[in-house]
């Protein structure tokens, strides 16, 4: 591997590492932001639940006031009925007076109960919504907790995957850079040594022939 190739490989590895860290940091920051929002889910749910509970209590109290007003109206009608009966000469034991007062009593109790029932029904519904709002807040809080844990795990796994991918790519490039045989320079040097040896051998043989006076 040449110096330029090594430098390029280093730059590539650094870029991959920075990219991996950036992905990791982004994932962890997103998880942190989501985790930081979790307490507000409980706070908002508690506020909403408290508001609904107050509305439930208000509805019940209002129905009680309306029921009391109906009871007062009934008593007022009974008083007027008795006054009219007395003015007309009728007694308290008169059948007409008794029937009229019984009718006023029944109607008064009916309207009183109707007000109470309506207020109680509305109060129960609001109390249910209050409890449900708080439960939803808790569920959202827990669900975000799971999401935060998964996001952090995903960020770690992604960073590890990026590092492993970078290491694998670097190892591959390094292996490709290894020589699988002699380089051109090595071959040229070897051929030069071989030719020089041949020249020396030929010279030695020629000298030996001259000394022996023979020609080979």
Image (tube, helix red, strand yellow):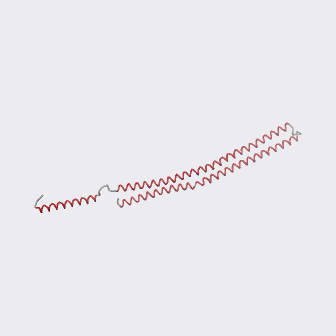
Left-right relation of 74 to 119: right
In the rendering, at what x and y percent does residue 159 appear? 47, 55
Q: Which residue lies most toward the top here?
A: 95
For residue 92, what is the image quadrant? top right
Q: Which residue lies most toward the left here?
A: 213
Camera-side residue of 83 and 200? 200
For residue 15, what is the image quadrant? bottom left
Q: Quadrant of the C terminus?
A: bottom left
Q: How many marks can you see?
A: 0
Camera-side residue of 200 and 42? 200
For residue 36, what is the image quadrant? bottom right
In this picture, is 82 found above or below 4?
Answer: above
In the rendering, at what x and y percent does residue 171 appear? 39, 55
In the rendering, at what x and y percent does residue 72 appear? 79, 46
In this picture, is 205 found above or below 86?
Answer: below
In the rendering, at what x and y percent does residue 204 appear? 16, 62
């Amino acid at each position: 591997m040449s110096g330029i190739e090594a430098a390029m490989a280093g730059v590539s590895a650094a870029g991959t590492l920075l990219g991996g860290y950036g992905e990791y940091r982004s994932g962890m920051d997103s998880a942190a932001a989501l985790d930081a929002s979790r307490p507000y889910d409980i706070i908002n749910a508690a506020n909403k639940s408290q508001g609904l509970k107050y509305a439930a209590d208000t509805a019940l109290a209002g129905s009680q006031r309306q029921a009391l007003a109906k009871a007062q109206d009934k008593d007022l009608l009974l008083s007027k009925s008795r006054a009219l009966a007395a003015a007309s000469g009728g007694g308290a034991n008169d059948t007409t007076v008794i029937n009229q007062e019984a009718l006023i009593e029944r109607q008064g109790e009916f309207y009183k109960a109707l007000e109470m029932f309506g207020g109680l029904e509305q109060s129960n519904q609001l109390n249910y919504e209050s409890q449900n709002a708080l439960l939803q807040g808790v569920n959202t809080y827990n669900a975000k907790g799971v999401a935060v844990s998964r996001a952090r795990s995903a960020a770690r796994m992604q960073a590890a995957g990026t590092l492993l991918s970078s290491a694998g790519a670097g190892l591959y490039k390094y292996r490709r850079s290894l020589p699988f045989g002699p380089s051109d320079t090595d071959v040229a040097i070897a051929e030069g040594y071989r030719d020089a040896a041949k020249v020396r051998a030929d010279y030695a043989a020629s000298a030996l022939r001259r000394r022996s006076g023979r020609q080979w």
